[in-house]
Amino acid sequence: MNPDRLVLDLEGVEMSAVLNELNNKVTPDDPYIQKLRVALNRPGVTRVVLDLKTVVKAQAFTLKPVADYRHRLVLDIYPSDPPDPLLVLLQEEAAKQSTPVPAPVPQAQPAAPQSLPPLPKDKVTRLATIVIDPGHGGEDPGALGRGGSQEKYVTLVIAKRLKTMIEQEPGLRVVLTRDADYYLPLATRVEKARKVKADLFVSIHADAFVKPHARGSSVFALSERRATSEAARWLAKKENEADLIGGVNLDVKDRYLAQTLLDLSQTATISDSLKLGRHVLLELGAINTLHKAQVEQASFAVLKSPDVPSILVETAFISNPDEERRLNDDAYQDKLARAILNGIKRYFAKNPPRPQSPLAFKN
């Protein structure tokens, strides 16, 4: 068939003005869709035909009503072989650095720093790659504040502020799992971090709880067994259910993760995650009340990378009216981003990037 087409038959759906308008929704610069047509195929069945520009993968799923939306059918289209910009960058730099360079001499771990030491700049060192994951997005708004705030927007703003700060730090590089308002399956977030050989993965959230007076910041690492508190179990279940939006259950579909969780390497990764979490929690405690004074552990799906230390940061409870207002304040968003960055820097002061991280040279 030329061109390739994607056909969707909607049974029990009659033609309407809204469906007719879909014909004009595709712009000439759309990377995947050449043309879209909607017509009545037979009584009670409306057909949507997409003429494609390239080979794609498609996924259809339904969404329950939320906020102003009613029941919805969502069709996601992905490139068959999606490019990864950071991976391309890593490959280009690896090619440039083909000349063998001796690794830096290992140093003894220093005592807990009283101030934040800069990463070494006067010699060959290793670049640390940090993946920042703004929680939720697109059809998944996340938690909703009483004032109308949506978690997906708050997390994206904080993540972008953090990205800007990290880019100004020598020895660090950063990538966002999403840089706009679109849905991203939990498994894809994990896979992005592994694909770019990330040294750290930080997922940012601003969750809600059943009680509006719940407040404070929290940091979570993965638990191989059970969560350390009832709130942790409740939040983990809520976050993992987001995968149902994409029709994917990470624990069932992703075989290598399920297998690797049984491997001892996961224990070492969790240990490093806890170290990172403690540093970040210490910094968050300087600008906000802590919901719990220690790093909690729960089975969040985005923390299940077998070889990338990963934490989930609950910046505050968006369900608390006071914290919701602070989460929408530019200055406070900067404080949150700075606190997370300071925690990351403290971690690297005692835990240098792994040997396979790219080399950096003094200019």
Image (spheres, grey):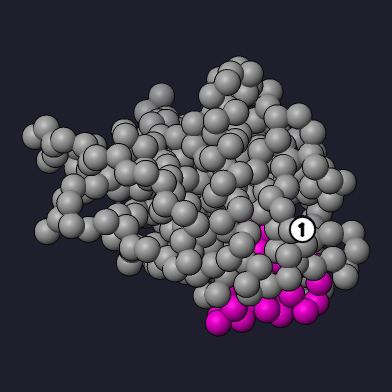
Q: Residue at x 87, y 46 (%)?
A: 230
Query: Residue 328 colored magenta?
Result: yes
Q: Residue at x 50, y 57 (%)?
A: 112
Q: Position of residue 349 (x, y in %)?
A: 41, 53
Residue 300 is at least partly visible in this image: yes
Q: Is residue 255 above or below residue 53?
A: above
Q: Secondary structure at mark 1?
A: loop
Q: Residue at x 51, y 46 (%)?
A: 201
Tell which of 310 and 84 is nearer to you: 310
Q: Quadrant of the C terminus?
A: bottom left
Tell which of 262 and 132 is nearer to you: 262
Q: Position of residue 271 (x, y in %)?
A: 58, 37
Q: Quadrant of the N terminus?
A: top left
Query: Residue 350 colored magenta?
Result: no
Q: Is residue 240 above or below residue 20?
A: above
Tell which of 73 and 221 is nearer to you: 221
Q: Residue at x 24, y 47 (%)?
A: 125
Q: Amino acid at mark 1?
A: Lys
Q: Which residues are magenta?
A: 313-333
Residue with the mark numbered 1: 292
Pick out the residue farthest to the left. Answer: 99
Q: Residues within 10 Å of mark 1 (few under 14, many from 20)?
A: some
Q: Position of residue 329 (x, y in %)?
A: 61, 81
* Residue 186, quarter of the rendered image: top right
